[in-house]
Amino acid sequence: MNEIIRDTQAAAAGASLDPQDWNEFRTLAHRMLDEAIDGIANVRARPVWQPIPDEMRAKFRADVPRQASDLADVYREFSESVSPYATGNVHPGFMGWVHGGGTAVGMLAEMLAAGLNANLGGRDHMPIEVERQIVEWMRALFAFPESASGIFVTGTSMANLMAVLVARSSALGTLARQHGIGNDRALLTAYTSKAAHGCISRAMDIAGLGTDALRKIDVDADHRIDIAALRAQIAIDREVGFKPFLVVASAGTVDIGAIDDLKALAALCREEGIWFHVDGAFGALAILSPELAPVLDGIELADSIALDFHKWGQVPYDAGFLLVRDGEQHRQAFVQPAAYLRREARGLAAGAVWPCDLGPDLSRGFRALKTWFTLKTFGTDRLGAVIARSCALARYLEACVLAEPRLELLAPVNLNIVCFRYRADDAINREIVADVQESGIAAPSSTTLDGKFAIRAAIVNHRTDERDIDALVSAVLEFGARRSGDALIETEAPPLAVQ
Ligand SMILES: *Cc1c(COP(=O)(O)O)cnc(C)c1O
């Protein structure tokens, strides 16, 4: 027996992965933290984005590291090769896609969460209560009943998929989970608009319902779903024997930030007995701004809402969320009995509904902590003000575009997204976007609207201000002039900037 103890003690010397010298570790850790904070504080001094040099990329084709390296060396590699070549969404000049800017507070919370190394699949511990607290806050914000459930997921793509699965078991009964969807002869059909995010279609595919079963309804000039066309399609489908089961509304389309008429859709779904899901990936958090909240009228009538804290909520990636009105239906769609997950009356295995009952993941990280820190530290009023300000900046950009004859506005500005172009063909505008991105001045993205290539600026980052909008406009004008061979090289700020 003593020999066994001696052997394990001898092996232990090198076994644990904890630092050999905690003081040395601490010094380096503080340096890392300082430099990470400097990186955020001085973000304006850097290019928004820069192309990755080939030799940097090549460094990440190395062999499996069988031998140990010094933490300081690994960190140096990170500082030299990773951190300078990130997406750039921390930078106020980043307006591509719909990316959140994150905050220094969120960064600290991520570090604290990693220290706890909590697994939020289930069991009785405080991190789960933090997640439940966020669920309660979301219930309150969207006026959902106490029986509503919620869960953190990677992002809205996952939340939308889970909503399709909950709606599916709600329509077919939970036995369909056992029989499979093909065996009850129910041909489920779902509905969304042509402006909806592509992940809805993918969710239908992954759920086994097929993308053909998703009817993409026409939109009006403001990119909102045509309700009469939706109603007509549901009637046609019923007539030929399909079973309409789900309508997915967009609260903030990814192209132009359009919000469907949620109230009318809620009424239609109630009338038809169809699950009403809202994809509120970024738009749903407009609820935090008293000035913007009315555009979401009717969201409180949804059966489920998908949203991202990592976009307008400024929580570091990733922090998606699904809220379901009927918590029991939500549970019924995912719960699975397993002896090793048995709930007890007391002890660490106590507690009724665990997050693993509400989604496909068993092991789950502590996304709730960075969200809790963000909501509490800034307060929802201030976060709402940030959201309202990004809409005001979008209107400022809209005004700049309208005031500049060389630019053309391509879509109405609903929330925080502006689609425009230099008055030249698609090919030139495509080059302009890449030129602006590679210049490091700003990072817009692009989309296609009515067959036209559009430069798309989504203003999401709380650090973005008028200077960044002016810089984007100047850069588009300058590269536009160069690309189209116009004599004029404009480097001045656009007209509105000087007012
Ligand atoms: C971003 C977005 C999604 C996808 O969300 P992820 O968090 O990227 O998975 C879905 N719908 C809309 C409208 C979005 O803006």
Image (cartoon, helix red, strand yellow):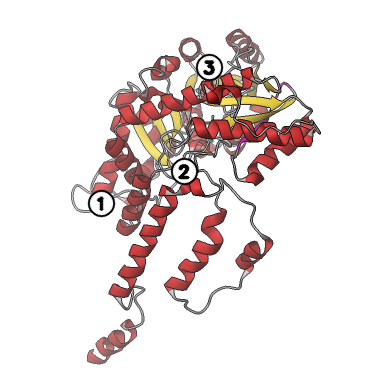
Which of 114 and 454 lies nearest the eye of the viewer? 454
Residue 353 pos. (x, y %)? 30, 40
Mark 3–mark 1 CB contact (< 8 Å): no
Residue type, mark 1 in image: Ala
Furthest residue in direction right, as rendered: 485
The label on residue 260 is: 3
Where is residue 198? Give x, y as percent. 62, 32
Quote the CA–CA distance across marks 1 and 2: 25 Å
| Viewer-side label of 3, 1 | 3
Q: Confirm or reject: label 2 Cβ below 8 Å from ligand 1.
A: yes
- In this rendering, would 342 be left or right of 54? left
Q: Position of residue 478 (x, y in %)?
A: 69, 35
Amino acid found under the numbered disc labelled 3? Asp
Circle 2 residue: 154
Instruction: Report, in whole angstroms, how far the alpha carbon at label 3 lies from the one at label 1.
Output: 43 Å
454 versus 125 height, above or below? above
Q: Where is mark 1, residue-wise?
A: 349
Picture coordinates of residue 56 (x, y %)? 62, 63
